[in-house]
Amino acid sequence: MTDAAFITEYFGAEKIHALLLMLVGMVALALAAWMVKHHKPLRGMAVPLVAAALIQLAVGSIVYARSDLHSSQLQQRVRQDPAEFKRAEMPRMKTVITNFALYRQIEIALLALGMAIVVLLRNREYGFAFGLGLVLQAGILLAQDYFAVARAERYLKAVVGG
């Protein structure tokens, strides 16, 4: 396992995903600000939009900032001691994938909660908009994590099989 191209590919994709996550967070913040200032009927969307945007910006920034160094360290490790690389990286990635399963459960619960709020508070402007915002952000996070899990599973397969 001396070809470290799969490491470069994985962390390159992680950086692109991190940038996308930050972009979605910035758009959500801008949309929330616009709604609060100019569109009273949708003001309730601002709370879940901002809450999720802060998470998106924080996670995206952390992943983007650490990806190059992490990739470099792992490439060095795989060249110096492929067996140690595999021993360390397999459990780390299994934990990453397990964590995504927890995130998925939370995101699905938030999506269901948002849908319930939309239905139950359909006649209350603020509550209805809040539910819509929750559905929107939970759905976006769920979709983004779907692709992150697929990428992590491909990477783990390369670690194990490489």
Image (cartoon, helix red, strand yellow):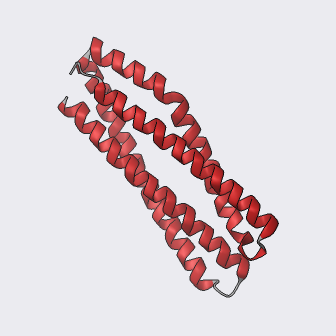
Query: Does 26 appear above or below 122?
Result: above
In the rendered image, residue 60, in percent from the top left (x then y), is placed at 55, 41
Q: Residue furthest left?
A: 161
Q: Quadrant of the C terminus?
A: top left
Q: Which one is in front, 103 or 162?
A: 162
Residue 26: image location, x then y, percent? 65, 49
Q: Is residue 148 left or right of residue 120?
A: left
Residue farthest toward the top in the current orientation of the protein: 80
Q: Is residue 51 left or right of residue 73?
A: right
Within the image, what quadrant is residue 155 found in? top left
Q: Quadrant of the N terminus?
A: top left
Residue at point 55%, 69% (across, down): 135
Task: Tell which residue pokes out farthest to the bottom in this image.
Answer: 123
Q: Position of residue 96 (x, y in %)?
A: 39, 41
Q: Farthest residue toward the right?
A: 37
Q: Which corner quadrant of the image does residue 93 belong to?
A: top left
Which x, y percent locates residue 141?
50, 56
Q: Is residue 71 above or below residue 114?
A: above
- The residue shown at (58%, 37%) is 61
Task: From this view, report whether residue 5 is shown above or below residue 38.
Answer: above
Residue at image point 41% right, 25% down: 71
